């Protein structure tokens, strides 16, 4: 095959965004995906925050297969038998839905790869890229089995466990500290029941996040409403599995056994079970982003962001795919695909929300690894709320006295100061 302008490996959000942008600008690009149908192997909770997709495909919400527009956000702290919840619902509808859409990755990824194909990219599904082709210190293409294809640039969009980033020496071996395990179940329920249960009208949707549902292990839970299904899941920081005998299914069973969760999923028919790694290393664990003839995007580069009340990866992946494409378009004009030319990619990411957000919240990782956040504080808040909202026919304490009693009964002052500083620094 003749030399292409670019090969993109992986048709997730990062890869399809890159291939779409390149093809739209008239470049010859091949989008290689190991699954027979894009999306088949991919997992997200998932809420797509689509502003960046709107920049690429204006009014994407009129064309893309989306589930529900998220209009209600909840953050609940769970103790064994109760839930303390912050609830935000808005009737305000901005023209661009920045509040996010719940999506089904199988449908969405297929649609997005099709958009790239319609724009002129050559989609090659069912092919796993095994290796990179090198000429001296420059990457010049990819190998899949006995097939070899050459291009000016290879864009790695092959996800969290990127073999290509490793083969290009862009990253060290992953450690458990930089990974989370996402576990997800999908429950089918009639549309009408979902709307009644979650107080939704028409296509409105809800995104619930939970802290205190992980048996004390660092991590959290989510529940998102789709049209006629619910996505229920956990993201657990991987080191938890090194210190506990609990397996992923054990933690999922524990989560589902909570009365509050049971109520939300009752009568639902389990349709899917999946698990997938999530990059959790944050800013300090981002891979090298470019070298001669090579760029790394999305999860493959560790570009994802989890701050408890928001888990964002798809919009980061799309933004990085677009930035990589812009860099290749500029390099094609000069004919220079060296790392000197491709370093522009990092600058584009530094100027965008991708690296800005990851840098701003670079200490959030320490906060979410603090075990007290996942056991002591949810319990404390729930016992405090219990005393606040019940009347026992004994004299009441003033609010501040009640709060101090609950705090000092559960946390030592040095721990409280340390945790307070972690919150201030992390969030
Ligand atoms: C349980 C869970 C919940 C999540 N919830 C959210 C959420 O609510 N919102 C959000 O924004 N993000 C969420 N995320 C994160 C989000 O899913 C990822 O950040 C996002 O999918 C990254 O996109 P990507 O294109 O970089 O990688 P991926 O989506 O992983 O795509 C990589 C693609 O590369 C292909 N591939 C891999 N290796 C090869 C190879 N050798 N050859 C050819 N193809 C290959 C794969 O098949 C895949 O299609 C969640 C993740 C998990 C696991």
Image: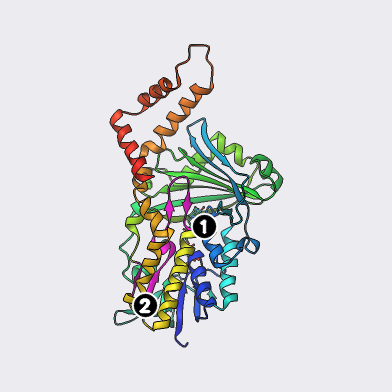
Question: Which residue does the image show at 41% across and 20% down from the upper left?
Answer: 401
Q: Nearer the viewer, residue 287 or 177?
A: 287
Is the residue marked 1 within 8 Å of ligand 1, measured from its CB? yes
Q: Is 294 or 61 nearer to us in this picture?
A: 61
- Residue lying at 60% horizontally and 44% vertically, measured from the top left: 90
Q: Which mark is residue 361?
A: none
Q: Residue sitting at 47 percent across and 32 percent down?
A: 79
Quarter assignment of residue 265: top right
Most extreme residue toward the bottom, as rendered?
2
Q: Which residue is farthest top? A: 394
Give the crowd class for mark 2: few <14, some 14-19, many >=20 residues within 10 Å: many
- Above or below, 18 relative to 187: below
Task: Work out whether 98 lies above or below 54.
Answer: above
| Residue receiving disc 2 | 293
Q: Nearer the viewer, residue 245 or 156?
A: 156
Q: Nearer the N terminus, badge 2 or badge 1?
A: 1
The magenta segment: 289-314
Magenta segment: does it hold 78?
no
Judge left or right: residue 218 versus residue 13: left
Give the secondary structure at mark 1. Answer: loop
Give the number of the disc on residue 43.
1
Q: Give the Cα distance between marks 2 and 1.
A: 29 Å
Report how many numbered discs are placed on residues in the image. Answer: 2
Indicate whether 119 appears above or below 182.
Answer: below
Report x, y in % for residue 73. 55, 44
Q: Which one is closest to the eye, mark 2 or mark 1?
A: 2
Expressed as whole percent of the image width and height from the top left, the position of residue 403 reads 42, 24
């Amino acid at each position: 095959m003749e030399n292409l302008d670019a090969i993109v490996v992986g048709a997730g959000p990062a890869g399809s965004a890159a291939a779409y942008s390149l093809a739209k600008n008239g470049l010859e690009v091949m989008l290689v995906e190991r699954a027979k149908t894009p999306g088949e192997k991919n997992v997200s909770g998932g809420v797509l925050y689509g502003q960046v997709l709107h920049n690429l495909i204006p009014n994407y919400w009129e064309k893309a297969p989306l589930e529900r527009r998220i209009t209600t956000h909840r953050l609940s702290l769970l103790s064994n038998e109760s839930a303390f919840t912050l609830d935000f619902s808005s009737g305000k509808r901005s023209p661009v839905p920045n509040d996010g859409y719940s999506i089904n990755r199988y449908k969405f990824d297929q649609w997005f790869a099709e958009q790239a194909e319609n724009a002129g990219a050559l989609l090659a599904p069912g092919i796993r890229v095994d290796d990179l082709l090198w000429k001296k210190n420059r990457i010049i293409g990819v190998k899949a089995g006995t097939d070899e294809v050459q291009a000016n640039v290879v864009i790695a969009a092959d996800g969290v466990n990127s073999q290509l980033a490793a083969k290009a020496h862009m990253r060290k071996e992953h450690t458990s500290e930089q990974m989370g395990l996402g576990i997800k179940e999908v429950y089918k329920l009639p549309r009408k029941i979902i709307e009644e249960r979650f107080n939704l009208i028409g296509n409105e949707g809800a995104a619930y996040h939970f802290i205190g549902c992980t048996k004390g292990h660092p991590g959290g839970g989510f529940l998102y409403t789709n049209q006629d299904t619910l996505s229920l899941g956990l993201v657990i920081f991987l080191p938890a599995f090194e210190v506990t005998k609990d397996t992923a299914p054990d933690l999922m069973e524990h989560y589902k056994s909570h009365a509050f969760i049971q109520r939300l999923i009752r009568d639902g028919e389990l349709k899917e079970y999946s698990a997938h790694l999530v990059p959790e290393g944050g800013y300090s664990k981002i891979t090298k982003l470019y070298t001669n003839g090579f760029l790394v995007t999305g999860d493959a580069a560790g570009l994802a962001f989890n701050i408890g009340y928001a888990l964002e990866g798809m919009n980061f992946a799309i933004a990085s795919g677009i930035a990589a494409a812009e860099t290749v378009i500029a390099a094609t004009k000069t004919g220079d695909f060296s790392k000197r030319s491709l370093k522009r990619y990092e600058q584009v990411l530094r100027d965008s929300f991708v690296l800005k957000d990851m840098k701003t919240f670079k200490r959030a990782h320490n906060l979410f690894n603090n075990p007290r956040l996942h056991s002591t504080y949810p319990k404390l808040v729930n016992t405090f709320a219990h005393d606040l909202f019940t009347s026992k026919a004994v004299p009441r304490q003033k609010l501040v006295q009640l709060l101090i009693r609950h705090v000092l009964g559960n946390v030592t002052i040095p721990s409280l100061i340390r945790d307070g500083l972690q919150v201030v620094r992390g969030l």
